Image (cartoon, grey):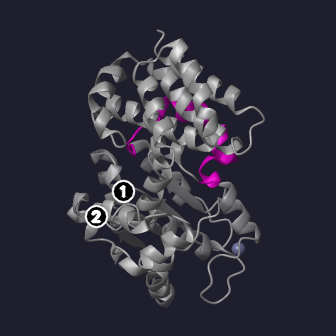
Amino acid sequence: MEKQLYPWHQKNWQRLQKMRKSLPHALIFHGPEGTGIADFAEIWAKTLLCENRQGEEPACGECSSCRWFEQGSHPDYQRLTPDALEAESDSGAADGEAGEETAGKKTKQASMKIPINAIRQLHDFVNITTHRGGFRIILIYPVETMTTEASNALLKMLEEPPAQTFFLLVTNQLSALLPTILSRCGKLAFPLPDKAEALAWLEQQQVKDAEIWLAEQGGAPLAALEASETNLNAKEHALLLESLSAPRLAILLKTAEQLQRVPVRQSIIWIQRWLYDLVSQRQADTIRYHPRHQQVIKQLAPKADLQRLMAMVKQMADRRKTAEHPLVPRLVLEDMLMDYLKIFSG
Ligand SMILES: [Zn+2]
């Protein structure tokens, strides 16, 4: 899916355009979750690298640089994000060809954290000649998920900035970053959009009761859109969560049948979030998506075969790419739920 520049980001877009000739080597984009800051950062990186730039317009989407970027294989661009987040990412670029090659390795490492190895690998990246425009871009998000070691390694790089390299750091928690990192970066704030703008956008996305959803998500429009879509099939969602909570063959088969009424892509997202919370519980003793199921997830997570769980997380990202119009949705659903069952069948 192509990332878009949201209307509430226009001001920052213009601000950056004005800074273009004097960009700091490291820039932090910070603001609340659910407002699309990482999307903005990716569009900005793609635009800087675009070889066919027109005034203040975003990247052309057609030059070879843009095409590489979209495939996730631009030689002058690196994106660091926790593996677990990568697996649930919406973007095709996230799991492009480059991702496939290292799939085996990734599966084992899928994690909520950005580890020090990821930062170490950057040393190779910044020490080779740039391929195209004479500079390279490193995008890291959410920056606060770096381990302490990773943060310190990044700090070292910022202290002696590699030549021709721009760091774009995205965070929803500015205060969680090391003060020493903060002091070496330029900062750009992404406040919540004003209500009228957010509502207008939600209505364009055909969200009913936009005002209620927006309020429930604290004014964050992307979070509101997501919540409204999830609720659309609340009954099926509840049923799925119930059967994921107590995985048994007969129940899972019945669930696959019931879920046929929901777009397959939606079921995949629900299952991905559940898996994400299982991994998160297992590795970081915390969950993100299912606060009401916290106890169940706590009990379930230690029983999971970690290797199978990670393999499934990876597979789900592939499934999401091909799931728009499956011939027999029920088979796809059964297949996923049987994989899930295996995670717990020792
Ligand atoms: Zn281009």
Q: CA distance from mark 1 to mark 2?
A: 11 Å
Q: Is residue 55 magenta?
A: no
Looking at the image, residue 179 lies above or below residue 260: below
Q: Nearer the viewer, mark 1 or mark 2?
A: 1
| Residue under numbered circle 2 | 181
State which region is magenta: 91-115
Left or right: 89, with 75 as reference point: left
Residue type at mark 2: give it: Ile
How would you classify the magenta stretch by its main secondary structure? helix
Left or right: 77, with 346 as reference point: right
Looking at the image, residue 184 lies above or below residue 333: below
Q: Are marks 1 and 2 in contact (CB under 8 Å)?
A: yes
Q: Is residue 104 magenta?
A: yes
Tell me which corner region of the image, top left, top right, bottom left or bottom right, holds residue 242. Answer: top left
| Residue under numbered circle 1 | 143
The secondary structure type at the circle numbered 2 is helix
